[in-house]
Amino acid sequence: MKTKILSFTVIVFMVGSILTSCGNQSKQDAKEVKQDAKELSKDLKQGAKDTSQEIKTAVQSDWNTFKTSSEKAIENTDKEIKVLRTKIAKANKNEKEKLTKALNKLEEKNKELKEKLAQRGKEFKEDVIDFNESAKANEEKFEREFTHDMDELGTALKDLFKNNVD
């Protein structure tokens, strides 16, 4: 009977020590997993930050190029409007009235585009734009729309005398 009790006691200690050591190992594994998760999270945040910085640099570079060319286009449009005003001054009274109204509308559109460009530039300076994956697409959309509006304005200015001199 003593051997049975002794065997039983030894078995209980062995099972207890095995269970205790398994518990410690799983706790250690859990700590390692948490640590790995924290490091991965830090890496992801740093990667997102780096990507955001790359996008910001690319978008700002593209913006500066676009802004320079757009300002030149607006300046050229201003000059063209002044030239057209002198031509209109030489036209007869009836045409002068029509052409002046049309040119005033086109000049107002040019001012709106200038303000739109200035507002966008202000957003860049004040860092209002959130530079993420969609920032580049949004900027390309803005540039496309702005260029389209400038092209329409240029065409309208060129056609000003064609449409009214019939």
Image: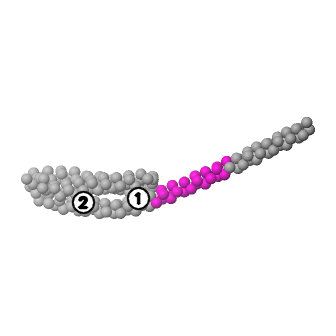
Q: Label 1 vs label 2: CA separation?
A: 26 Å
Q: Is residue 59 left or right of residue 50?
A: left
Q: Main secondary structure of the magenta part?
A: helix
In the image, what residue occupies the spot 38% across and 61% down?
A: 62
Q: Position of residue 8 (x, y in %)?
A: 85, 39
Q: Position of residue 100 (x, y in %)?
A: 17, 53
Residue holding disc 1: 59
Say if the magenta span includes residue 80. no
The residue carrying mark 2 is: 77
Q: Between 128 and 26, which is closer to the camera in this rendering?
A: 26
* Quarter of the view holding residue 124: bottom left
- Residue at the top extreme? 1
Q: Residue at x 51, y 55 (%)?
A: 48
Find residue 75 and name its label. none
Q: Which residues are magenta?
A: 30-54
> Does residue 111 appear in the picture of this structure?
no
Front residue (pair 43, 113): 43
Secondary element under disc 2, as helix, strand or loop, is: helix
